[in-house]
Amino acid sequence: MARPRLAWLLTVLLLPLTARADEKPCTGRNAGKYYDLNGLQTANDYKFKTPEGHDMVLSACKSVSQETWHLEVEDPGQVGGFVRRDHGDFSLGQKNTTLSFSSRAPFHPHLTFTSGSKCVDANGNTLDHLRGSTEIEFVCDPAAGNGVPRLIAQLPPGGDAAACAWVFEWRTKAACPTSEGLTFGGVVWFLFISSLILLGLYLLVGTLYNYFMLGLARHRRAAALFRKQRDVPWARGMGEWERVVGEWTRWRI
Ligand SMILES: *[C@@H]1O[C@H](CO)[C@@H](O)[C@H](O)[C@H]1NC(C)=O
């Protein structure tokens, strides 16, 4: 009976541990592999140029650190990347720390940024319903270090002023499958659960020991004591007295 209860206890205790692993930002599991892109978080953003020569700034797993300029979005603190246009910065989308995977490329984690700056139509009018968005495909490359994002598509055609959707490929060692590393919370849970298991074992062994070994020893000791009593004068006297009392009671009955 104790064993199912212990298993149940362990399940309850270990569940938060697995839940925590899933919740860690910028990590994900797909096709039996685990990915952790948090290594791409650096103090400096990743900077490069568009084909037309405008500065572009992108960040992974966090919002950009660099100051923005004339950025017209509701929450400038959440911007995942921007392009520095002639009249102000244009947001490539809000940062996102949820990895996604497509069936086309099951081993390439993706990040999707949406809700960037408002796009403009072919006549240069601002569109309220269409906003900048970005798709980054990460490709495992153990030799690339952190690597840099490479712009592979910018839509619609029409140059930097018209662009409103970007696709990047980012070859990086951070996109290689890894094992789930030890987090501080994980270590604390591990220690907590280990000590619970040890405590449980201690109680179990202690109880069994008390029940069997000490019980046995008590019987032995009692037997030994009884044997010894015959050699001790007063004990012999007691024994004698018991015999007398016994005989007396038998006689009375
Ligand atoms: C973040 O990425 C996930 C996975 O691609 C997507 O479902 C979600 O809509 C994105 N959130 C935002 C705010 O872009």
Image: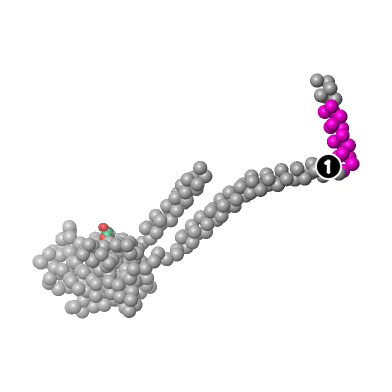
Answer whether residue 12 is magenta in the image: no
Q: The magenta stretch spans which residues? A: 232-247
What is the secondary structure assignment of the residue under circle 1?
helix
Q: How many marks?
A: 1
With respect to residue 105, does 203 lie above or below? above
Q: Residue at x 68, y 45 (%)?
A: 216
Q: Residue at x 20, y 62 (%)?
A: 131
Give percent across and percent down for residue 80.
29, 66
With respect to residue 251, does 60 lie above or below? below
Q: Quadrant of ligand 1?
A: bottom left
User: Which quadrant of the figure has residue 72?
Assistant: bottom left
With respect to residue 234, does 126 lie above or below? below
User: Which quadrant of the figure has residue 238?
Assistant: top right
Could you tell whether 232 is left or right of 75 in the image?
right
With respect to residue 54, does 13 lie above or below? above
Give percent across and percent down for residue 44.
35, 74
Residue highlighted by disc 1: 229
Q: Nearer the viewer, residue 77 or 151?
A: 151
- Quadrant of the snapshot with the C terminus: top right
Give percent across and percent down for residue 196.
54, 53
Observer able to see residue 168: yes
Could you tell whether 229 is left or right of 15 in the image?
right
Observer able to see residue 66: no
Q: Residue at x 42, y 66 (%)?
A: 181
Q: Residue at x 23, y 71 (%)?
A: 168
Q: Amino acid at mark 1?
A: Gln
Give percent across and percent down for residue 103.
22, 62
Could you tell whether 46 is left or right of 191 in the image?
left
Could you tell whether 219 is left or right of 227 in the image?
left
User: Which quadrant of the figure has residue 140?
Assistant: bottom left
Q: Nearer the viewer, residue 160 or 146?
A: 146
